[in-house]
Image: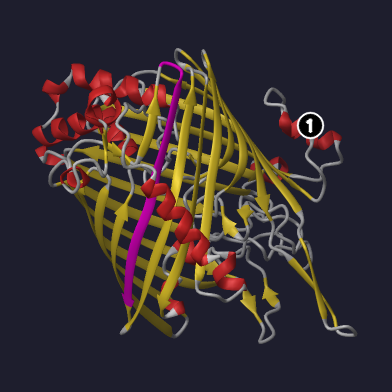
Amino acid sequence: MKNSFIKIYLLVVVISISYKLPAQIINLPAENETYFFLKKMQVDGILKEYSDYVLPVPKEKIIDAIKQLDTSRQLISFVERDYLDKLKQKYLNYNTNQVPVFSNFPEQVFSDKPKNLYFFYNDEITFIVNPLLDFKYIYSKNKYASLLNAGGEVKGRYSDWFEFEISAVNGSVFGNRNVALFDKRVKQSYTFNHTEINYFDGTTGSMYFHKGIFDLQIGRDRLLWGNGYINREVLSNNPPIFDFIKLSMNYKNISYNYLHGWLSAIPRYNYYDSVNTIVKSRTPKYISIARLGYQDDNFATGISQIMIYAQRPMELAYLNPFLFWESAQRSMNDNDNGFLSFDGKYLIKPGIEINASIIFDDINFQRYFKGEWNTCNNRLMWQIGTILTNPISLDNVVLRMEYFQIRPFTFTHDALSDALTFTNNGYMLGPDAQPNSARLSLALDYYLSSRLRLNVEYFYQIHGNNSYDKNGKITRNVGGDVNGYSTLDVPTVVYFLEGERDFKQMAALGLSWELFPGYYLNFNYEYHAIKFQNSFTRENFFTSHVIFSFN
């Protein structure tokens, strides 16, 4: 299989040498750094009505944002103008700027112009083939791991209403397996962890349909959903990606976003000693999200309904974007886990924005207004944050601060199974923190140039743990484990951060360098420290990452 993969990859490279036709922007992945730059421009008060609550956004909005910034380029710094010119060259002037990588070899390989391996373009059709290649080196505790990841992507467009993309990668791990788990792709890889071979793989793919104010996406890809500047409260980059249908509607100041996703529950294993066999079963699990939002130049707000349901086929009620799901699920005997969310942000003045959000899991109104706040069925998460751009007249600097609390038992459900928890394959959908936790996060980003960005991050977290016996059975449940909730032996009142506390700190220093369009070099250092009872553990991780991607 490995040799076949290499042959296919080389074939893609070879057939792409001799073409030179204009290409067109198809879609930007949710974690593309362009979004961070556009967010800074919005907080600077230059980019009006830009919203990154749901990423990725339709490509038309990115193109419009770039054009709008170009009309106000006199208001931004020299470094930001250079960065804007990079975006213009890459996404707007594609008719004249695209070059084949291997034409006039090797000069064009390192050209500053945007490039693709293979592309075809006419008035109706765009077709693009590109490589995906990266090498990552991780060092910790005198041990190392090297990750080599290779694959390709294909993107296409027909007319102005249909687009598609598909990517596939296959990675190899060399060195220490435990150190390799520092990389999230390896940590969440079924191939690496369950078959115990030194490989990890991944694939994404989507179809996009656009008509007027409507955008429909069907696929498997990374989605980010929430107002958080550091931690997205609804969907973050913490869980594995999943399959979904996403519908977006935007008209003037009003937006409506709908999602139905196919999640994974942790597999169940049944052992039969008599024949020495194992049977693995998978519980169907789904998520639906719908958000109605409003935004003007300085203010944005939204209300969302979220539903987790499982252990049966898809429900038509949750496939309906125009329905109040909480009432619908009660009519179906209240078998599901529903949430209600409110979010808002306000641009105080150019350079200073604040936001806040709250997600209600359960609300016990009878106790809510009697001063009995700390009941186990009053469950919620709240988050506040601020972002400062160019603080104290420091150009090209972004400072982000954020604080959140997740109350005990929030995102859990009344069972030992994870079928109705707010997780995908055991990983939290939002921030990577368990219930009964509080976290303060800080981040600073400095554009040293249009190609060089410095990032510093820090967080401090307190978590109230459940108590367990030597066999792993819960002896005291304070709502500190998203998969550990049961209606048995749960106290009526649980105070926030009650339980066996652990204290976690993380500090990171990163440097991202775009050598040429499509070639990236990243250096990163992370320090992790955990204090629990009488133990104190420290870990240091050093990584270098070379990325070859034309996104």
Q: Picture quarter containing residue 459?
A: bottom left
Q: Quadrant of the C terminus?
A: top left
Q: Position of residue 366 (x, y in %)?
A: 72, 42
Q: Quadrant of the N terminus?
A: bottom right
Name the one closer to the observer, 12 or 315.
Answer: 12
Q: Position of residue 336 (x, y in %)?
A: 76, 45
Which residues are the magenta region?
123-139
Whether residue 194 can be seen here: yes
In the rendered view, tell whether residue 220 sits above or below residue 407.
above
Q: Secondary structure at mark 1?
A: helix
124 within the magenta span: yes
Magenta stretch prevailing secondary structure: strand
**As drawn, which residue projects farthest toward the right?**
274
Does residue 203 appear left or right of residue 398 in this picture? right
Near mark 1 (Cα within 10 A), the count class, few <14, some 14-19 or many ≥20, is few
Residue under the point 14% across and 33% down: 82
Residue under the point 82% across and 78% down: 277
Name the one closer to the observer, 254 or 261.
Answer: 261
Residue under the point 66% across and 63% down: 483
Residue under the point 51% across and 69% down: 199
315 within the magenta span: no
Q: Picture quarter containing residue 362?
A: top right
In the rendered view, tell whether residue 65 sits above or below residue 511.
above
Q: Position of residue 446 (x, y in %)?
A: 18, 47
In the rendered view, tell whether residue 92 sits above or below residue 33.
above
For disc 1, the marked residue is 316
Give the residue type at disc 1: Leu
Could you tell me how many numbered marks the image carries? 1
In the rendered view, tell whether residue 357 sits above or below residue 296.
below
Does residue 128 appear left or right of residue 243 in this picture? left
